[in-house]
Amino acid sequence: MKNLISLFYTNLFLTRRLLAGLIACIVFFLFRFFFEWLGLLPELFFGALMLLAMLDALLLYRTRNGVFARRQAPERLSNGDDNELAVYIENFYPFGIQAGIIDEIPHQFQKRDVWFKTSITSRQHKLISYVLKPLKRGEYDFGMIRVFVHSPLGLLSRRYNFAEQEVLPVYPSFLQMRQYELMAISNRLNEMGIKKIRRLGNSMEFEQIKTYVPGDDYRNINWKASARQGSLMTNNYTDEKSQQVYCIIDKSRAMKMPFEGLSLLDYAINASLVLSNVALLKQDKAGIITIAEKTGAIIPADRKPAHINKILEVLYKEKTRYLETNMEMLYTTVRRVIKQRSLVVLFTNYESLSSLNRHLPFLKRIASHHLLLVVFFENTELKKLSQEPAKDVEGIYIKTIAEKFAYDKKLIVKELAKHGIQSILTSPQNLTINTVNRYLELKARQRI
């Protein structure tokens, strides 16, 4: 009995409607000191209000389990993407209710306004959807679901607590990966911003002999097969397969810089995941190497069916280090792990020519054995400053410094090109598109 009373008090709350009624009672009692003709009206009003409150409590508590709620969430969340979750709620009361729902989302989102209001008729259910966008990989702790129920009288509110605590991991952007995958399968990558690259010459990978149709290259006509068939036949070639594509991710302090909530490391990880998946769809082999002051994860290039899941699991655990990148260690690792000529995509960041010059000797050595593509980032905040008009002397100074940093980025591109090293200077939001574009271009031009 004691537990029942405690449960009653801890889960029963006054609503604004009842509080307004109590305030009205206090006003009536005060007025009676000045207007005696009110008589027993304040007591009658207060008594009626208490009777209605007791009736409301009876309505709310006569059904032991009046509502049921649970969270519907995926097994894992995608970093940097809008993830859809939902709260399922069902009403077992014999009357319609008004419900307020609080879903205790993880503290990483820093949101305190996840409050949903809805009305549900008797013996019906509803699904309330909402969206969360995580900006950091790792484990996210979801708490309880709390439902506050009002009867049609609306004087009291009964709270239900549902123990829906669960931990959801936030993985690199697999939703973005699937989006590119679907577009690649249906040959609609141009809708994602992927350019169509004109193939120069023929690849060495013969696929089949097929019937000639207008538009086919007449230089590929197979005259012997045409003579046997009595109609024009042509050789059909396809892109070379089983070429190795390695994504090297720099996870030093240079990649800690944030952009729209995500760090540059997370942008590089998301782009590496998409590029690896596109390479596998093109029948190439994909591999991963992470580096900071020491070598991190190494996944040798392969194209097995479960290989992309292996890459996803490894990238999920990678974290930023706070020391300088050991380029000598990177060169040694590349020579040890990558045995044949491959496309090596290095995701890093350079803010000045001096930082590039420290790494350049090792980049030149890697480029002598492989096709090296260095991907680094524009400083979008400085770019905005350089484009804004200066209003005073301080503004002129800031604008000049911003333009100097932007010019240094362009000098880095020219310096890499001077040594025969491919490069991409991109904003973080365009990283994935620009990287996949360059991979397809290099493949079409038979540079790998």
Image (spheres, helix red, strand yellow):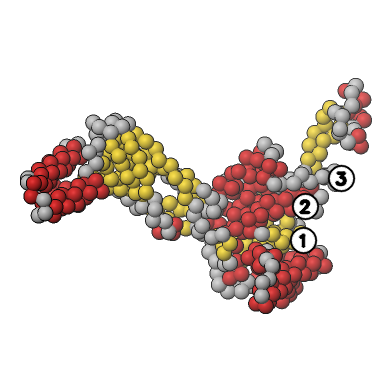
**Percent position of residue 154, x then y:** 24, 41
Which quarter of the figure has residue 293? bottom right
Is residue 360 something that shows in the picture?
Answer: yes
Where is 346 relative to 176, above or below?
below
| Mark 1 in CB contact with mark 3 (< 8 angstroms) | no
| Mark 2 in CB contact with mark 1 (< 8 angstroms) | yes
Mark 1 and mark 3: Cα distance apart in space: 21 Å
| Label ID, residue 442 | 2
Tell me which amino acid carries mark 1.
Gln
Which quarter of the figure has residue 213? top right
Identify which residue, 37 or 374, lies in the foreground. Answer: 37
**Percent position of residue 310, x then y:** 56, 51
Q: How many circles with numbers are drawn on the protein?
A: 3
Q: Residue furthest top?
A: 230
Is residue 300 something that shows in the picture?
Answer: no
**Percent position of residue 79, x then y:** 52, 53
**Percent position of residue 405, x then y:** 70, 71
Q: Residue at x 82, y 31 (%)?
A: 209
Mark 2 neighbour density, 10 Å: few (under 14) some (14–19) many (20 or more): some
Q: Which residue is mark 1?
A: 422
Mark 3 neighbour density, 10 Å: few (under 14) some (14–19) many (20 or more): few
Q: Residue at x 63, y 43 (%)?
A: 181
Left or right: 173 in relation to 374: left
| Label ID, residue 201 | 3
Where is 207 relative to 82, above or below?
above
